[in-house]
Amino acid sequence: MNRGLVGVLIYTVGIGAPTGITVAPEPAQADEDLPPIRQLHRQGEIRSLAAFVERARQRYPEARLIEAELLRDGGRLIYEVELVDSDGVVRELFFDARTGERVTGYDEESQDH
């Protein structure tokens, strides 16, 4: 099964409020078979990261976004949204980037990145 990191999306935050989303350069170990993240979104292959960030914030309203990654698990593309709450607990939520469904029981540790 082909698994790994497709790209990293970093949500930059200022004091108090988020200031924007930055798409980091594609890492060296990124899937060579896939177009860049922005192209996937423009082609309608994946949904917007902003919607997933909003869903994660609804679940953990006091949390701050650390980063988001687009992962590949075989033919499936999965967003990982990572937040830290006011107690310093890191929360990771996974979403199918194509369908928008929440992915539960995803084992990121088995990733090859």
Image (cartoon, rainbow, N blue to C red):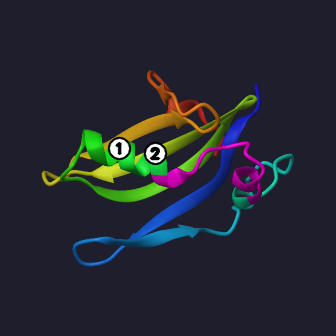
Residue denoted by label 1: 56
Q: Report the magenta residues as a range.
A: 39-50
Which residue appears at 84% of the width and 51% of the height? 32
Please state which of residues 113 and 79 is positioned toward the viewer in this rendering.
79
Q: How far apart are marks 2 and 1 (CA)?
A: 6 Å
Q: Residue furthest left?
A: 87
Task: Identify the image quadrant of residue 93.
Answer: top left
Q: Are marks 2 and 1 in contact (CB under 8 Å)?
A: yes
**Residue 1 left/right relative to 23:** right
* x, y percent for residue 47: 61, 45
80 magenta-colored: no
**Figure check: 25 above or below 104:** below
Q: Badge 2: few (under 14), some or many (20 or more) residues near its Cα, within 10 Å?
A: many
Which residue appears at 66% of the width and 43% of the height? 46
Which residue appears at 18% of the width and 53% of the height? 62
46 magenta-colored: yes
**Residue 49 left/right relative to 25:** left
Q: Residue 52 carries which label?
A: 2
**Figure check: 56 above or below 23:** above
Q: Badge 1: few (under 14), some or many (20 or more) residues near its Cα, within 10 Å?
A: many
As helix, strand or loop, the secondary structure at mark 1 comes to helix
* x, y percent for residue 13: 35, 72
The three-letter amino acid code for the residue at tag 2 is Phe
**Residue 91 left/right relative to 98:** left
The three-letter amino acid code for the residue at tag 1 is Ala
**Residue 58 left/right relative to 8:** left
Which residue appears at 48% of the width and 54% of the height? 50
